[in-house]
Each structure stands twice: as structure tokens, then as C-alpha cells.
Image (spheres, rainbow, N blue to C red):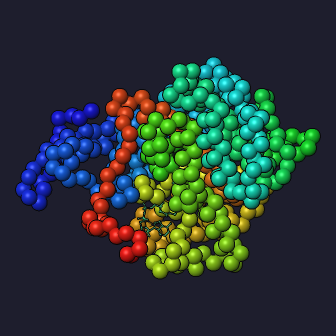
């Protein structure tokens, strides 16, 4: 791993330590600090892991300064334009674009495993009708480990687990929506593509299939592709962290779903559209919301804006903005939220506060407008993000298990609490 380069650190007591430096294939350099504590007693401190590399990976490359995103070396723009979601899922998990035969075989594996165990259907009865679908999804996905052999078992098979997860999470997602609407579950069908099947399970009514245009299906494929991986973000790190204790893949993915739910991460897709709806109801005054976002005494933030890594326009947001125009046009929908989103973006990108902090629309800013056009309810937006991110999580989990240096993730801390004090018996406190 380490090449010949080194970095020298001088401590305040004059001690010097030489640390190995290594470089990635895109010339990113890292100082390996793993020996620092053993040699000096010092640890590194990095609030929010802003500057911490937690692993070495071959899956996704992001250059946040230039606004570049590639999966396994392929530019996101080309994948979004030319691929179906299942093809990209295969690429992420197996490292290469599938041949026609490999893709057919993978799709057949998904079809074969799309139904959940009949007993699992009863779980839905136990959830309150108003349950957030992310709460249902995270617990149901974790519970898959009670039905299928886990990663430590001899009969465990990675390919089966991949197909089972990608197929069943989609079914569970659709059922969580049907649970909320009180409609009967619609079984997955063998003759439909991944996205068609999902929409059919969500929306087909009694005796009638859900009709959807090819362009709308392409739009859904595209949104899922754009969400499919994003290197070591919060949820992916949660998946790797849980997996590092040798917990099963399903449980690790359940943790990823929980991490994704928060409004600073995948929950921003729901929060962004709710914000646009509030602005619309409030008369469309974008300036007022920009002022609120800039006010340090106001907790409000422009949702779908800003990113830890991108200090340039998020390439995913650029593609989605264009997709919004196409899909609304195709479906003949006049959604006032799209013009509000565009105005908000324009005002923000001309404002010194956003310019000086390099705050641009992120993937969550425009995604919700596409989901709305497809009839997907707002509380399902983060579920959609989950469907997209799943192959990325699986790929990242698997990569970590294949690392010869794989060890449990266990960060340190700087303790700032009470020093040792005498215990006081309860009747003397
Ligand atoms: N609205 C207003 N101010 C913002 C925003 C925003 N959306 N985002 C960042 N800032 C300000 C922040 O207040 C800080 O200002 P100052 O330097 O004066 O203290 C500065 O910009 C840097 O922000 P930060 O909070 O230190 O940045 P971070 O890297 O810790 O957080 C973020 C990144 C994405 C959580 C944040 O930008 C944010 O809260 N955005 C809104 C939520 C959102 O859209 N999340 C989706 C992220 S992308 C997809 C995904 O991960 O799911």
C-alpha cells in the first residue's frame, strides 16, 4: 500500500515522526496515521470525518472540486444516458458492465427472488397505518436475516444474497406503500422490468395493470442510477461500520437505511420538496427563504443544497434538472414546484452567502419533482433513494469483506468528562 513518500509530523515536545504516504489511481494522497498513537500516544481528531479516509476503494470516484462522478471508472453522465438501473447495479456489485447474457441471467435471478416469504407479509399488519415507510423498510430488511443464511453460514452464497436483496427490497418498499393506502399487496411479476415491476406493485388497481410510458420508465431508471453509489457517505459508512463487526449483510443494509433516513442525507429528498411546497403555499417568495437560510439564528437550511464533497455543481443535480423538464413535458404536467426550484437556485447562486461557501443544488434538489410526476408520494422519496443506493451499499460491504486487512471499525475519542471521583452511596446524595 505505502509507496516511498512520507510525511513528517513534529509534536509540541519536539519529537518527530515519519508517517507513510500513499497515492490513489486519481492522484489523491493520504497520510497513513495508523501507527501514530502507538509511537507517540497522540490520536488524530477530525470532527465529522471531514478529512478522514476510512478505506481504500475501487468502486466510485468523486472529484468534488471539479464536479466529477464515476462508477468503476465510467462517467455518471454516460451511465445515466445509456444504461438501465439493473445494468448499473451489476456494474457496481461485480465491477464490470454485464454482457447481454450476464444481464439476462442477473435479471432472471431478481425475478426468481422477488417475492418475500408469506410470513413476512404479516409483519405489515403490526405497523401503524401512519408509519413512515423508512421505519418499515429498515426493520423489514434487517429481519430478512432471520429467513436466510447469514454471511457466516456455510451455505451462504453472495450472488443469491445480492439478487435476493435487490429484488426483495423493491417488493418491501412497494408493500410499505400499499400498507399505508390499505390496498391489497400486488405480487411482483416475472414479465416486467425492474422499474415497471415496482410501479406496478405500487399503483396497479383491482384487475388493471399500471400503464406507464417508456420515457417515464427511463426517467425512473435514471434517478435510481444517479443515486446508486457515492463512495463513503453517511449511510455507506454505516453499512461498512456495522459490517466490520461481521454482522450479516441484511443487518448492515438495515443500518444504512436508518442512516439514509435523516434530512441531512437521503431524507433531504423529502425535505426539499416539502420546502418547495411551503414556498409555493407562501406565495412563491424565494427571497424570504434564502434570507432564512442565511440567518444564523434560524435553524432553517435550504434543503437539497450544499454538499460535504461537492464544491461545484453536483453532476447528478445537473442531469436531474434536465430530466425534470423532459418528464414534465412528456407527461404534460405543469408542476409549479419546478419553476420555484429553478428560481430558488438562481437567487441562491447569485447570492454571496452561497457563492462564498460553494453551495450548489445537490442530488436531492430536483429528484422529488420527478418522483411527484410519477405519482410517488412525498414520504416515499427516501425509500426511492434506498432502492437506488442499495447496489452501492452491497458493493461497498462486499469490498470491505474482501480486504485482507479487514478489521473492526472502532474510532477513538478525546474524553472531556469528569476525572476520577469517589462514589457516593444513594442515601448520601
Ligand atoms: N443552507 C444554508 N446554509 C448552508 C447549507 C444550506 N443547505 N449547507 C451548508 N450551509 C452553510 C453552513 O451553515 C456553513 O456556514 P458557516 O461556514 O457560515 O458556518 C457552511 O455552509 C458549510 O456547511 P457545513 O454544515 O459545515 O457543511 P457540511 O459538509 O457539514 O454539511 C450538508 C453538508 C449536506 C449536510 C449541508 O450542506 C446541508 O445541511 N444541506 C442541506 C441538507 C441536504 O440537502 N442534504 C443532502 C446532501 S446530498 C445527498 C445526500 O447525502 O443524501
Q: Nearer the viewer, residue 42 or 417?
A: 417
Residue 109 image offset from top left, x and y in percent: 67, 25
For residue 384, say whether it is visible. no
For residue 130, say whether it is visible. yes
Who's the residue at 62% across and 47% down the image?
A: 138
Quick one: which residue is furthest to the top in this view?
Answer: 101
Image quadrant in which you'd find residue 97: top right
**Rendered view: 191 above or below 236:** above
- Is 44 on the left or on the right of 81, as rendered? left
- Is 245 on the left or on the right of 161, as rendered? left
Residue 185 image offset from top left, x and y in percent: 82, 42
- Is 156 on the left or on the right of 134, as rendered? left
Who's the residue at 39% across and 58% down the image?
A: 48
Residue 404 image offset from top left, x and y in percent: 35, 28
Q: Which of 102 and 135 is in front in this view?
A: 135
Who's the residue at 25% across and 43% down the image?
A: 34
Residue 335 image offset from top left, x and y in percent: 73, 63
Quadrant showing the N terminus: top left
Quick one: which residue is furthest to the front in this view?
Answer: 427
**Rendered view: 231 above or below 154:** below
Amino acid at each position: 500500500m505505502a509507496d516511498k513518500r512520507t510525511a513528517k509530523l513534529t509534536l509540541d515536545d519536539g519529537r518527530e515522526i515519519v508517517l507513510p504516504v500513499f497515492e490513489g489511481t486519481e492522484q489523491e494522497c493520504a497520510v497513513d496515521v495508523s501507527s501514530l498513537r502507538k509511537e507517540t500516544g497522540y490520536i488524530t481528531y477530525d470532527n465529522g470525518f471531514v478529512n478522514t479516509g476510512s478505506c481504500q476503494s475501487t468502486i466510485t470516484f468523486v472529484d468534488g472540486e471539479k464536479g466529477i462522478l464515476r462508477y468503476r471508472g465510467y462517467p455518471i453522465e454516460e451511465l445515466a444516458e445509456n444504461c438501465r438501473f439493473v445494468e448499473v447495479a451489476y456494474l457496481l456489485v461485480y465491477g464490470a458492465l454485464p454482457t447481454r447474457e450476464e444481464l439476462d441471467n442477473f435479471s432472471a435471478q431478481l425475478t426468481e427472488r422477488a417475492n418475500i416469504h408469506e410470513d413476512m407479509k404479516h409483519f405489515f399488519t403490526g405497523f401503524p397505518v401512519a408509519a413512515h415507510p423508512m421505519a418499515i423498510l429498515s426493520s423489514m430488511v434487517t429481519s430478512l436475516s432471520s429467513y436466510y443464511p447469514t454471511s457466516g453460514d456455510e451455505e451462504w452464497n453472495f450472488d443469491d444474497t445480492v439478487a435476493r436483496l435487490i429484488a426483495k427490497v423493491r417488493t418491501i418498499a412497494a408493500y410499505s406503500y400499499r400498507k399505508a393506502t390499505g390496498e391489497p399487496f400486488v405480487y411482483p411479476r416475472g414479465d416486467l422490468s425492474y422499474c415497471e415491476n415496482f410501479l406496478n406493485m405500487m399503483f396497479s388497481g383491482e384487475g388493471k395493470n399500471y400503464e406507464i410510458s417508456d420515457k417515464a420508465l427511463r426517467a425512473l431508471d435514471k434517478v435510481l442510477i444517479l443515486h446508486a453509489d457515492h463512495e463513503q457517505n453517511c449511510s455507506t459508512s454505516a453499512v461498512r461500520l456495522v459490517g466490520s463487526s461481521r454482522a450479516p449483510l441484511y443487518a448492515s443494509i438495515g443500518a444504512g437505511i436508518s442512516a439514509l433516513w435523516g434530512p441531512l442525507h437521503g431524507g433531504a429528498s423529502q425535505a426539499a420538496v416539502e420546502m418547495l411546497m411551503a414556498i409555493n403555499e407562501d406565495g412563491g417568495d424565494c427571497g424570504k427563504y434564502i434570507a432564512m437560510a442565511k440567518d444564523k439564528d434560524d435553524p432553517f437550511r435550504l434543503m437539497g443544497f450544499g454538499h460535504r464533497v461537492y464544491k461545484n455543481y453536483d453532476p447528478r443535480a445537473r442531469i436531474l434538472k434536465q430530466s425534470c423538464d423532459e418528464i414534465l413535458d412528456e407527461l404534460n404536467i405543469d408542476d409549479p414546484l419546478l419553476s420555484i426550484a429553478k428560481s430558488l437556485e438562481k437567487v441562491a447562486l447569485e447570492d454571496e452567502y452561497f457563492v462564498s461557501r460553494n453551495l450548489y443544488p445537490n442530488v436531492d434538489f430536483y429528484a422529488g419533482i420527478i418522483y411527484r410526476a410519477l405519482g410517488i408520494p412525498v414520504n416515499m422519496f427516501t425509500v426511492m433513494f434506498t432502492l437506488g443506493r442499495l447496489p452501492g451499499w452491497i458493493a461497498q460491504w462486499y469490498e470491505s469483506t474482501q480486504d485482507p486487512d479487514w478489521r473492526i471499525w472502532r474510532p477513538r475519542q478525546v474524553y472531556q468528562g469528569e476525572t476520577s471521583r469517589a462514589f457516593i452511596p444513594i442515601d448520601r446524595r
